[in-house]
């Protein structure tokens, strides 16, 4: 079973029950589409929704008897708000018919990599044979297998304003470094040294989560997995009507990147609330045709 099915409310479901849901979904999908894959063959996607914008997607082919043969499946959550408008580079995964999106967002300091949800739309578009795609924006959502709620850092309005200014300045420096600006590189290096020295002085007497408000870091060898710490901007609690398990959908601000995270309430330690922080590991997904 897919490791992130629990994130959309299939935490304690048996194989026989899951198989029945799969067969029903493939016979009566809520969405279906077919396009030519990267080899020029017909490839299809079926979806079964749990609630609007969340469910299970099945990708595969139809055989000569017009029966759907599943290649793989994955849980998904489609976010409603655009997270970034940076142009996306598309990279096909080697072991299956799927794409990873890669964009250089200066807010993060690392390349943002995500599993592309709307692959069929990309394959159908006039950009299917190009490496870069610019559809007007990317909506991002992460599925979390576990996480915890962290209390916020108390900050005055003046400190928040200073933090925003520093973040904006850093983004400008990172963008300049990417195009080869040597002065920006030297200034960014000096700023990083100042930050390191400041943290080194305080870490002996303060907890690291009191020093770091948010972070966004790659996690493990899979490029679309991240460890995140972000401020909760909005919360929704919904039920999976198949299992009656509760799911939290939280909108996070993480290094000024806004995206959604879905997590089973049984996998979340603590009580989420707006203004508190979420800390956990996520699988990042994105829709490039916003």
Image (cartoon, rainbow, N blue to C red):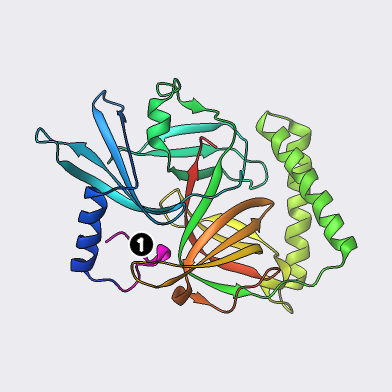
Q: Position of residue 252 (x, y in %)?
A: 62, 59
Figure check: 11 above or below 102: below
* Pick the front one: 26 or 162: 26
* Pick the front one: 130 or 48: 48
Q: Position of residue 37 (x, y in %)?
A: 30, 29
Query: Is 233 part of what is drawn in magenta?
Result: no
Q: Position of residue 165 (x, y in %)?
A: 83, 49
Please report the residue visible at 73 percent of the width from the left and 42 percent of the height from the top: 171
Figure check: 82 above or below 149: above
Figure check: 273 above or below 258: below
The reply, left or right, for residue 244 in relation to residue 43 is: right
Main SS of the magenta segment?
loop
Please report the residue visible at 23 percent of the width from the left and 55 percent of the height from the top: 24
Residue at the disc numbered 1: 5
Chain part drawn in magenta: 1-12
Disc 1 on helix, strand or loop? helix
The reply, left or right, for residue 158 in relation to residue 289 is: right
Figure check: 73 above or below 205: above
Q: Quadrant of residue 277?
A: bottom right
The reply, left or right, for residue 17 in relation to residue 107 is: left
Check the picture and name the quadrant holding the C terminus: top right
Please report the residue visible at 61 percent of the width from the left and 59 percent of the height from the top: 251
Q: Quadrant of residue 66?
A: top left
Check the picture and name the quadrant holding the N terminus: bottom left
Direction right: furthest residue: 158
Q: Position of residue 158 (x, y in %)?
A: 90, 61
> How many tags in the picture?
1
């Amino acid at each position: 079973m897919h490791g992130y099915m629990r994130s959309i409310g299939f935490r304690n479901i048996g194989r026989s029950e899951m198989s029945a849901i799969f067969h029903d979904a493939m016979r009566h999908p809520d969405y279906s589409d077919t396009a030519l894959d990267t080899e020029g063959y017909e490839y299809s996607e079926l979806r079964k929704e749990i609630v609007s914008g969340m469910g299970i997607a099945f990708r595969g082919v139809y055989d000569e008897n017009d029966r759907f043969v599943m290649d793989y499946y994955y849980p998904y959550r489609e976010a409603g708000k655009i997270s970034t408008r940076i142009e996306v580079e598309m990279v096909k995964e080697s072991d299956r018919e799927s794409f990873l999106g890669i964009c250089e967002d200066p807010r993060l300091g690392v390349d943002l990599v995500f599993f592309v949800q709307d692959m069929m739309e990309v394959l159908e578009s006039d950009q299917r044979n190009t490496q870069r795609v610019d559809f007007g924006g990317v909506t991002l959502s992460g599925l979390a297998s576990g996480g915890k709620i962290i209390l916020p850092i108390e900050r005055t309005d003046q400190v928040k304003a200073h933090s925003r200014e520093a973040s904006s300045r850093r983004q400008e420096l990172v963008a300049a470094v990417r195009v080869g600006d040597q002065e920006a590189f030297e200034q960014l290096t000096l700023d990083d040294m100042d930050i390191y020295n400041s943290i080194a002085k305080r870490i002996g007497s303060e907890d690291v989560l009191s020093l770091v408000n948010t972070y966004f870091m790659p996690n493990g060898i899979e490029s679309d997995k991240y460890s995140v710490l972000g401020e909760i901007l909005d919360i929704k609690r919904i039920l999976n009507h198949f299992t009656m398990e509760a799911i939290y959908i939280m909108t996070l601000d993480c290094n000024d990147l806004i995206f959604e995270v879905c997590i089973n309430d049984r996998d979340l330690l603590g009580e989420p609330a707006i203004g508190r922080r979420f800390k956990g590991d996520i699988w990042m997904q994105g829709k490039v045709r916003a």
